[in-house]
């Protein structure tokens, strides 16, 4: 529950009497919380696959990798990516922190922005390559293409937007305090 400008307590979303639209209580924390949730969900999916789950793996990684599951792929592509996603979730939650000062604050802000740019670039560039039928995508099956265009790339774009909003809010909190 959050105290609104008019003095009432509510669930966090409210409009103000000044007419400046819908605002979410809790300051800049909501994008960071959603970014952490995004990263955790992605980590769980990779751990599911690493533990032998099959649903969605073939259309994500390709039939050959999904069926053969070489050790390097399971270790790096599934367990490794899952762990990196969990680190991303921790980093996203750190973007909610108000107690970080000095170079640590700047490094955290730049890391948040870098993750945002990386996720957005991955999502947008692969989407463009698939839509334009670039030669680099010639080995992609129609099922992989469909799932990449409708699920995976939008998922990366969503993550990029969430990390970008979290970093932006974290950076603005610094400016507001000064």
Image (cartoon, rainbow, N blue to C red):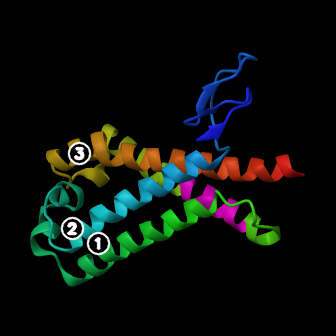
Q: Residues within 10 Å of mark 2 (few under 14, many from 20)?
A: many
For the residues marked 2 and 3, what is the alpha-carbon distance in whole angstroms? 17 Å
Quadrant position of residue 26: top right
Q: Is residue 21 magenta?
A: no
As helix, strand or loop, the secondary structure at mark 3 comes to helix
As helix, strand or loop, the secondary structure at mark 1 comes to helix
Residue closest to the eye, 148 or 28? 28
The furthest residue to the right? 178
Q: Residues within 10 Å of mark 1 (few under 14, many from 20)?
A: many
Query: Is residue 133 in view?
Result: no
Q: With 43 as the anchor, is 122 left or right in this view?
A: right
For the residues marked 2 and 1, what is the alpha-carbon distance in whole angstroms? 7 Å
Residue closest to the eye, 30 or 72? 30
Give the residue number, with chain letter if any, for mark 2: 49
Q: Position of residue 151 (x, y in %)?
A: 29, 44
Which quadrant of the rendered structure holds the N terminus? top right
Quadrant position of residue 158: top left
Q: Earlier in the sequence, mark 2 or mark 1?
A: 2
The answer to the question of whether label 3 and label 1 lie on touching residues, with beta carbons closer than 8 A, is no
As helix, strand or loop, the secondary structure at mark 2 comes to helix
Eyeballing the image, is 74 above or below 92? Answer: below
Q: Is residue 108 magenta?
A: yes
Considering the whole magenta stretch, tell me its main secondary structure: helix
Label placed on residue 78: 1
Residue closest to the eye, 42 or 16? 16
The furthest residue to the front? 8
Q: Which residues are magenta?
A: 107-117
Q: With 28 as the anchor, is 99 left or right in this view?
A: right
Q: Residue at x 83, y 46 (%)?
A: 176
Q: Position of residue 67 (x, y in %)?
A: 9, 69
Label placed on residue 147: 3
């Amino acid at each position: 529950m959050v105290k609104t400008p008019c003095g009432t307590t509510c669930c966090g979303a409210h409009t103000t009497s000044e007419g400046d639209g819908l605002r979410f209580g809790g300051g800049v924390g909501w994008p960071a919380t959603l970014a952490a949730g995004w990263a955790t969900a992605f980590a769980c999916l990779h751990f599911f696959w690493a533990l032998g789950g099959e649903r969605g793996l073939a259309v994500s990684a390709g039939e050959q990798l999904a069926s053969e599951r070489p050790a390097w792929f399971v270790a790096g592509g599934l367990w490794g990516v899952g762990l990196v996603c969990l680190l991303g979730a921790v980093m996203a939650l750190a973007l909610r922190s108000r107690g970080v000062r000095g170079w640590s604050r700047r490094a955290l802000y730049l890391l948040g922005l870098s993750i945002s740019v990386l996720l957005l670039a991955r999502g947008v560039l692969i989407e463009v390559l698939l839509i334009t039928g670039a030669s680099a995508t010639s080995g992609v099956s129609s099922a992989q293409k469909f799932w990449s265009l409708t699920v995976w790339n939008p998922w990366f774009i969503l993550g990029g937007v969430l990390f970008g909003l979290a970093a932006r809010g974290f950076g603005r909190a610094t400016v507001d305090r000064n």
